[in-house]
Image (cartoon, rainbow, N blue to C red):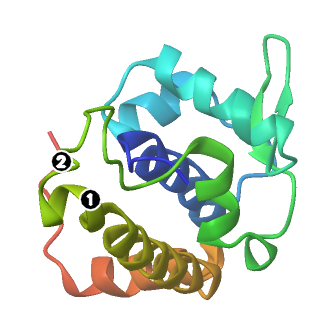
């Protein structure tokens, strides 16, 4: 796992939007970028990662775009997270600890254990939620929310 970045939420946004819209034809990176309020280049980079992992599939050409490669019920948030984030969530940095200080000598092993438990809890939570479930919750929230006026 890596320090949580916006890549994770953008990747979830992409997959959930593809799920909710359920289009037969592929969706373009430009459309996804407008929806996620980000640059199409960012979307294409994330799509490349999702494609390599078998979560999305690209269709090149003038009428090309992207679609889900698996059913949304088969994609967990942990799957997505593991694709777009790398490394440990928590970091100690590269500083030297003072060997003459009780905390300097002993804090890191204690905190590594705490961090390991926190990462395990996060992974468990992400593993229990699918893209389909996120899409359903979004639909329910949206149904209760006032809609913006069309221009």
Q: Position of residue 135 (x, y in %)?
A: 52, 74
- Label 2 packing within 10 angstroms: few (<14), some (14-19), many (20+): few
Q: Which mark is residue 84?
A: none
> Left of 129 or right of it: where is 92?
left
Q: Residue furthest front?
A: 100
Residue highlighted by disc 1: 105
> Where 105 falls versus 14 (above or below)?
below
Q: Residue at x 45, y 45 (%)?
A: 10
**Residue 133 appears in the picture as rendered:** yes
Q: Residue at x 32, y 70 (%)?
A: 111
- Residue 149 x/y as whole percent: 12, 54
Determine the CA span between mark 2 and mark 1: 61 Å
Query: In the rendered view, does 1 fall on the left or right side of 59?
Result: left
Q: Is residue 26 visible?
A: no
Foreground: 57 or 3? Answer: 3
Residue 18 lies, in percent from the top left, at: 63, 54
| Quadrant location, the C terminus | top left
Point out the frontmost of discs 2 and 1.
Answer: 1
The answer to which of 46 and 146 lies nearer the viewer is 46
Q: Disc number at residue 150?
A: 2
* Circle 1 SS class: helix
Image height check: is 38 above or below 146?
above
Q: Position of residue 55 (x, y in %)?
A: 80, 51
Dot 2 or dot 1, earlier in sequence? 1
State the residue at coordinates (86%, 62%). Answer: 70
Q: Nearer the viewer, residue 64 or 14?
A: 14
Q: Could you tell me which quadrant the N terminus lies in?
A: bottom right
Instruction: For the residues labelled 2 and 1, say whether their Cβ atoms are less than 8 Å apart.
Output: no
């Amino acid at each position: 796992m890596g320090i949580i970045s916006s890549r994770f939420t953008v990747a979830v946004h992409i997959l959930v939007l593809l799920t909710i819209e359920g289009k037969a034809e592929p969706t373009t990176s430009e459309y996804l970028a407008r929806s996620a309020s980000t640059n199409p280049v960012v979307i294409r980079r994330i799509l490349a990662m999702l494609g390599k992992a078998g979560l999305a599939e690209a269709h090149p050409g003038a009428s090309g775009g992207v679609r889900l490669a698996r059913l949304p019920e088969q994609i967990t948030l942990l799957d997505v997270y593991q694709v777009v984030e790398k490394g440990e969530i928590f970091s100690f940095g590269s500083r030297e600890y003072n060997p003459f200080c009780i905390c300097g000598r002993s804090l890191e092993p204690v905190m590594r254990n705490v961090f390991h438990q926190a990462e395990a809890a996060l992974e468990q939570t992400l593993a229990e939620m699918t893209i389909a479930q996120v899409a359903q919750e979004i639909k329910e929230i949206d149904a209760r929310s006032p809609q913006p006026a069309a221009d």
